[in-house]
Image: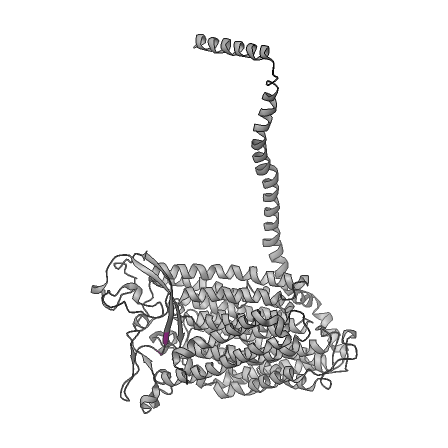
């Protein structure tokens, strides 16, 4: 129906077109303005599925378990990219895989060209080598910035996740935002958010990725602070924006280092125009020529590569809310609940995980960088889990849960094996479904409770809200890692990859063993705080806050329907895709490199890890049931014993206060001192100089009195003074 190239640009174009349509006609459409976005995002989802199937079919030779079977498919493999980029090759049945993984790149237009922007140093020992060094010219060459889109396994999976969850969230938002005076404006922002995220994961060069990295941040600022007349919402939007700027500095530095070391910002290889010679810039940073070499051929050496990795991880910490830049995400709950669901499940916070996965060839060079990624992920998972234990705001519990689960993903990526990296991405995939389900369930509760989300003020809602109750329970079981739901498969795959790395030994084995135990303990915390939230909200005696009045009821079907779909997905996607999805991801060029082929591969079921994790999850659920469904005296006694820790946990380990004292207040003091100096010294000095001509005029003005005798006397005195000076000289 559509060519692959057409699918690649239509997927992001449809949400953008819908957003522009609503921006122009939203005031006249009113609440019907949701329909263009629902249609646009739903069509993008259908097209994303079509693209995924085509990429899967073309990727068969690089999927480990299917490579042998692919030889019998003949022409069903579809279109392949050759090792020489830009030339599509139709392999015969006897052909082996061509190049490194499958990628399809389409360049829509040339954005900008900076002439003679880079002067290569072909004699540098660490510099990447072109295919034909004799043909390269050691003279400056241009920086060409293209709007290029790519289709590979990683991009196609991300597009399906983003558009599927976005479709359900947009449908849900139509009921949730009913009656809001800025209804059409909200859907404009939502459409731009989806467009920016689809472009981010589709970009095939670092500059375009950076543009939409910033666009996603700008959209999140608009959506978190959507209710801008509410001070806490406006402050939360500003906090998210500023904290993310810190991480974005890391991405900017990484892009700069990549440019000066590689001479290009393209992921893919490019061919010069006819008659032009091959240059270093023809090698994409993550292109076939570089990835097909045994070493990975990453320019600049291990030191520069580690610097690039650490800058990329700083950027990921900002977007994916990892320590120490995690503080913005819980406050982002001030935005509408559909925004929270979309942001936590499929868009902004997953961007950091995607970035690190896409740049795997960099991290494969530096073991130190991988350990940093794993350590930050493991520590963040534990820290967020400890904070979530005592929160009473249902959405904040889920927010800290997101921070913790993202930590698991980075732990898997930091393991650095094929099994660990694909497990991290698989957890991103499953997490999208059950976390969207939980957030939309929390929004359903908030909608019914008159805007109240404090779990101490309501309870026993299971009979009042049966759809919300059962779907929330499915999401909670998946998040807790109870088998055989989605979270069990993906979380255990991460823990299994870390456990397997420990068994291989090596100088870093002790560090990864510690991270493994931290991950297991975090699994216990996850099960406990998840079912603490479930029991407080849906079990016990029914309690309705006064804000709900007599109108507390189950949400309408345009809100309950997406909950049912997401709950079903949370139950089944783990078991359905726990082997096929990780194997498919290995067809991504960044993950098909030789360095990963010699590491632990996905698809191995770690029975010992799964057994321990399942027991841990059941212990966590049982402990929550014992404390919150049993005699309240037991809970009160436990709270009294743990009171010091409870205060620290409830106050989020005082990290915000530490930042306030160490960063915010000193900067405010510097700003106040600078303002005083500006007003009282700089401005005063400038004003003084400006007044001198006026004062001089006042002093001289008296001499112009109109008396001829006075003028004559003044001339005589002046002449005498001049004569005296001449005689003295």
Which quarter of the rendered picture does the C terminus lie within? top left
Q: Is residue 655 magenta?
A: no
Magenta stretch, residue numbers: 101-105
Provide the major secondary structure of the magenta segment: loop
Quarter of the picture holding the N terminus: bottom left
- The relative height of residue 376 versus residue 707 in the rendered view (above or below) is below
Whether residue 102 appears in magenta in the rendering, the answer is: yes
In x, y percent, where is residue 341? 59, 75
* 624 lies left or right of 46: right
In this rendering, would 284 be left or right of 703? left
- Dividing the picture into quadrants, the one containing residue 533 is bottom right
Q: How many marks?
A: 0
Picture layout, residue 489 above or below residue 682: below
Q: Is residue 131 left or right of residue 366?
A: left
Depth check, front residue: 381 or 609: 381
**Which percent across, then down, holds residue 561?**
62, 85
Q: Residue at x 67, y 86 (%)?
A: 467
x, y percent for residue 380: 55, 68
């Amino acid at each position: 129906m559509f060519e692959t190239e057409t699918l690649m640009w239509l997927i992001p174009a449809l949400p953008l077109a819908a957003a522009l349509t609503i921006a122009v006609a939203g005031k006249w459409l009113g609440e019907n303005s949701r329909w263009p976005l629902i249609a646009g995002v739903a069509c993008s989802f259908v097209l994303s599925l079509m693209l995924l199937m085509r990429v899967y079919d073309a990727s068969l030779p690089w999927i480990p378990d299917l490579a042998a079977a692919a030889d019998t498919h003949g022409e069903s493999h579809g279109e392949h990219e050759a090792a020489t980029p830009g030339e599509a090759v139709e392999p015969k049945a006897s052909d082996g895989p061509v190049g490194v993984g499958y990628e399809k790149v389409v360049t829509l237009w040339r954005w900008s060209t900076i002439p003679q922007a880079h002067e290569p140093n072909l004699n540098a020992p660490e510099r990447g080598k072109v295919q034909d060094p004799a043909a390269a010219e050691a003279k400056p060459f241009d920086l060409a910035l293209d709007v290029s889109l790519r289709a590979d396994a990683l991009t196609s999976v991300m597009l399906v996740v983003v558009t599927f969850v976005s479709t359900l969230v947009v449908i849900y938002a139509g009921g949730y935002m009913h009656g809001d005076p800025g209804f059409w404006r909200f859907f404009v922002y939502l459409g731009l958010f989806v467009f920016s995220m689809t472009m981010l994961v589709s970009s095939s060069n670092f500059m375009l990725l950076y543009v939409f990295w910033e666009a996603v941040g700008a959209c999140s600022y608009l959506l978190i602070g959507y209710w801008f007349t509410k001070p806490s919402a406006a402050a939360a939007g500003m906090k998210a924006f500023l904290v993310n700027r810190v991480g974005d500095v890391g991405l900017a530095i990484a892009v700069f280092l990549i440019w000066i070391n590689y001479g290009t910002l393209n992921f893919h290889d490019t061919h010069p125009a006819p008659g032009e010679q091959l240059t270093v810039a023809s090698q994409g940073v993550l292109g076939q020529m570089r990835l097909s070499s045994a070493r990975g051929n990453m320019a600049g050496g291990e030191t520069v590569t580690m610097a690039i990795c650490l800058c990329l991880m700083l950027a990921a910490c900002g977007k994916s809310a990892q320590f120490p830049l995690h503080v913005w995400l819980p406050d982002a709950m001030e935005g509408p609940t559909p925004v929270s669901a979309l942001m936590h499940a499929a868009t902004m916070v997953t961007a950091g995980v995607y970035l690190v996965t896409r740049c795997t060839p960099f991290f494969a060079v530096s073991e130190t960088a991988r350990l940093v990624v794993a350590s930050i992920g493991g520590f963040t998972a534990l820290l967020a889990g400890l904070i979530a234990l005592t929160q009473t705001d249902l959405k904040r519990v889920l927010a800290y849960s997101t921070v913790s689960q993202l930590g698991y993903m980075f732990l898997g990526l930091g393991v650095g094996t094929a099994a660990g990296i694909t497990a991290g991405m698989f957890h991103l995939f499953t997490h999208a479904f059950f976390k969207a389900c939980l957030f939309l369930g929390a929004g359903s509760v908030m909608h019914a409770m008159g805007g109240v989300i404090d779990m101490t003020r309501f309870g026993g809602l299971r009979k009042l809200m049966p759809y919300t109750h059962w779907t929330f329970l499915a999401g909670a079981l998946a998040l807790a890692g109870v088998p055989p739901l989605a979270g069990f498969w993906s979380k255990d795959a991460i823990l299994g990859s870390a456990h397997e790395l420990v068994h291989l030994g090596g100088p870093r084995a002790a560090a990864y063993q510690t991270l493994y135990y931290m991950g297991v303990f975090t699994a216990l915390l996850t099960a406990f705080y998840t079912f603490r939230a479930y029991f407080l909200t849906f079990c016990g005696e029914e309690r309705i806050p006064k804000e709900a009045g007599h109108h507390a009821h189950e949400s309408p079907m345009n809100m309950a329907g997406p909950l049912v779909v997401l709950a079903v997905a949370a139950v089944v996607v783990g078991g359905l895709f726990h082997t096929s999805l990780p194997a498919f991801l290995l067809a991504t060029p960044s993950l098909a490199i030789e360095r990963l082929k010699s590491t632990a591969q996905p698809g191995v079921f770690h029975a010992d890890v799964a057994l321990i994790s399942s027991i841990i999850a059941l212990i966590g659920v049982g402990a929550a049931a014992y404390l919150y469904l049993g005699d309240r005296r037991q809970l009160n006694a436990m709270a009294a014993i743990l009171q010091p820790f409870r205060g620290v946990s409830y106050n989020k380990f005082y990290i915000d206060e530490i930042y306030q004292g160490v960063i915010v207040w000193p900067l405010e003091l510097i700003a106040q001192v600078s303002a005083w100096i500006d007003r009282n010294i700089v401005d005063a000095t400038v004003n003084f100089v400006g007044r001198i001509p006026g004062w001089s005029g006042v002093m001289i003005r008296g001499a112009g009195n109109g008396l001829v005798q006075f003028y004559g006397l003044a001339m005589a005195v002046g002449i005498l003074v001049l004569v005296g000076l001449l005689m003295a000289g």
